[in-house]
Image (cartoon, helix red, strand yellow):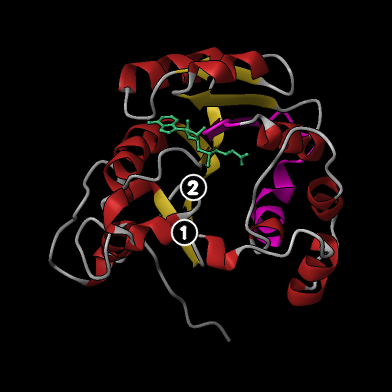
Amino acid sequence: MRRFRFDEEADVAADIRGKYGFDGELLEIFAGNTGAVVHKWHHYIPLYDRYLARFRDRPVRFLEIGVHKGGSLQMWRRYLGEQATLFGIDTDPDCATYDGAAGAVRIGSQTDTQFLSEVVAEMGGLDVVLDDGSHRMAHVRATFRHLFPLLDQGGLYMVEDLHTAYLPRFGGGHGTRTNFFAFMAELADDMHRWYHKEGLHHPGLSERVSGLHVHDSIAVIDKEPVHRPVHSRVG
Ligand SMILES: C[S@@+](CC[C@H](N)C(=O)[O-])C[C@H]1O[C@@H](n2cnc3c(N)ncnc32)[C@H](O)[C@@H]1O
């Protein structure tokens, strides 16, 4: 996506601050990074902070799919703090060199459900998943199907770089059924199951979805206890 590349001589922090009005600590951690390379779209930074701030300096169990150069794990360690249990997975065996640097790294595929279960068991459970892996639509959906049920209540599931949902080479496309946002729309139908008679698209999965958030290329799915809604007239 070269045409979206920011001029690397220019001021990254000023761009994020100016466009999104964000001046939180994650801005300095990202824009001031002189360690392992981390490559993020600018608008992700305030969004990460919006959803992840409540997990800072807590014993959060955070799994990132896609380690690459190890830079994002380093960013999450700086941001989330020492209490976080931080794991990254990647298919690239070279990523094993980052194991133990900012977090644990395990080598395997996001499509291998047994591997995923072993990683979650080693983590002692799961509060946050950030899928920045293959970005292939079939993989993103299959990984969600397996990991969302393993998330603890109060957890969240984030998928990034979902511009790929519009790219045929990732199995996506505008208006296609495989586009991850079509799956999100099905989850929205299921969330509103009380108000229609069409049944669930994803029984056993969607009943625990308590919130769906769509941003440019980022989807966030909340997991909390869901109750049949009621309303009252008071006063
Ligand atoms: C976009 S990079 C991750 C970047 C990293 N999170 C960061 O922000 O610096 C994507 C990574 O996903 C890995 N990957 C590709 N297919 C995968 C799969 N099926 N399972 C796990 N990781 C995969 C690639 O090897 C690559 O390192």
Is disc 2 in contact with disc 1, using a CB cutoff of under 8 Å? Answer: yes
Closest to the camera, between mark 2 and mark 1, is 1
Upstream in sequence: badge 2 or badge 1: 1
Residue that appears at 38% across and 24% down: 109
The image shows residue 195 at horizontal and vertical percentages of 25, 72
Amino acid type, label 1: Gly
Residue 213 in the magenta stretch? The answer is: no
* Quarter of image, res 73: top right
The image shows residue 225 at horizontal and vertical percentages of 46, 47
In which quadrant of the rendered image does the C terminus lie? bottom right
Q: Residue 192 vs residue 224: left or right?
A: left
Disc sitting over residue 154 in the figure: none
Residue hosting label 2: 224
In the rendered image of this protein, does residue 83 appear above or below residue 224?
Answer: above
**Can residue 38 be spotted in the picture?**
yes
Residue that appears at 51% across and 67% down: 216
How packed mark 1 is, by other alpha carbons closer than 10 Å (few <14, some 14-19, many 20 or more), is: some
How packed mark 2 is, by other alpha carbons closer than 10 Å (few <14, some 14-19, many 20 or more), is: some
Tag 2's secondary structure? loop
The image shows residue 130 at horizontal and vertical percentages of 53, 41
Tag 1's secondary structure? strand
Comparing 117 with 25, the one in front is 25
Residue hosting label 1: 211
Comparing 195 with 67, the one in front is 67
Q: Residue 103 vs residue 106: left or right?
A: right
Residue 50 in the magenta stretch? The answer is: yes
Comparing 80 with 124, the one in front is 80
Residue that appears at 42% across and 30% down: 150
Q: Residue 28 vs residue 210: left or right?
A: right
Comparing 159 with 185, the one in front is 159
Q: Which residues are magenta?
A: 46-68
**Can residue 184 be spotted in the picture?**
no
